Image (cartoon, helix red, strand yellow):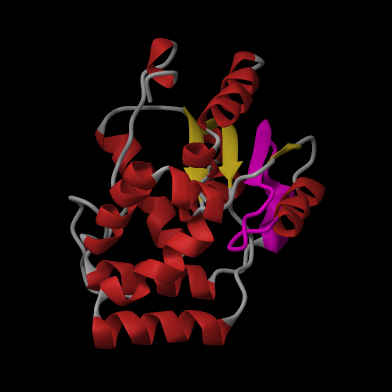
Amino acid sequence: MSVLTESFRVLRYDTRGHGNTDAPDGPYTIQLLAEDVVALLDALNIDKVHFAGLSMGGMIAQYLGANHGERIHSLMLCDTASEMPTLDMWNDRISTARDNGIAALLDGTLQRWFTAPFRDNEKAAVEKVAEMIRTTNTDGYIACASAVRDMSQTSILSKISVPTIIIVGEDDPACTVAQSRVLEEQIQGSELVILKNAAHLSNIEKTDEFNDAIMGFLNRQ
């Protein structure tokens, strides 16, 4: 944020079902979450934005770029994918959260989101994320997990015509380099940046390199 706000006015919001945003009954869809963004921009009288999204945020960004390109200057798709296998895996996570609470998913999530050396050496940063997970509304998580589970967006990627950068951690097991290459192949003119020694939250694990990629891209727009 400190890097972005030196040059831009930044709007950062909590997705439906997360943080301080309401968690109405689900399931949700990526389309619904994207239409929330459009409604938010309309409410704030913001005509057009550079949109950065990580993980589910990047899925929302894909939909916006394909269906609301007139509202988008550029897209930053970070540690994200256009399809998320498998159905059974997501159903298992949803069942675990429903039966045992969001905390039951904590350890597995942190293992996917950070490499082992980062978890060992940057405990304060990891704990901040752990607390975010613990305090996430369980119903909100389940509703958003359903949106990710049911997403199928590869077919719309060719409709994205705005400048796009794709950033991925080389060691991301959740949204892999291979999945990022699909985005690069399908979005004409897009560029791919692979950050070494980073997993799913590459913006936290490799902050300087991530910021350099984002700012270098934005400064070319």
- Let me know if residue 10 appears in the view: yes
Name the residue at the top extreme. Answer: 6
Residue 57 in sight: no
Coordinates of residue 65 in the picture (x, y in percent): 58, 43
Is residue 174 shown in magenta? yes
Q: Nearer the viewer, residue 72 or 120?
A: 120
Question: In the visual, does 76 lie left or right of 158?
Answer: left
Q: Position of residue 1 (x, y in %)?
A: 38, 25
Q: Which x, y percent locates residue 58?
A: 53, 49
Residue, far front: 121
Q: Is residue 208 left or right of residue 126?
A: right
Please say if 79 is above or below 1. Answer: below
Q: Residue drawn at (75%, 45%), measured in percent from left and top? A: 187
Horizontal arrangement in the rendering, residue 130 relative to residue 210 (left or right):
left
| Range covered by the magenta-colored residues | 154-176
- Quadrant in the picture for the C terminus: top right
- Residue 193 location (% of width, % of height): 71, 36
Q: Is residue 132 above or below residue 208?
A: below
Residue 190 is covered by the magenta coloring: no
Q: Quadrant of residue 8?
A: top left
The residue located at (31%, 56%) in the rendering is 130
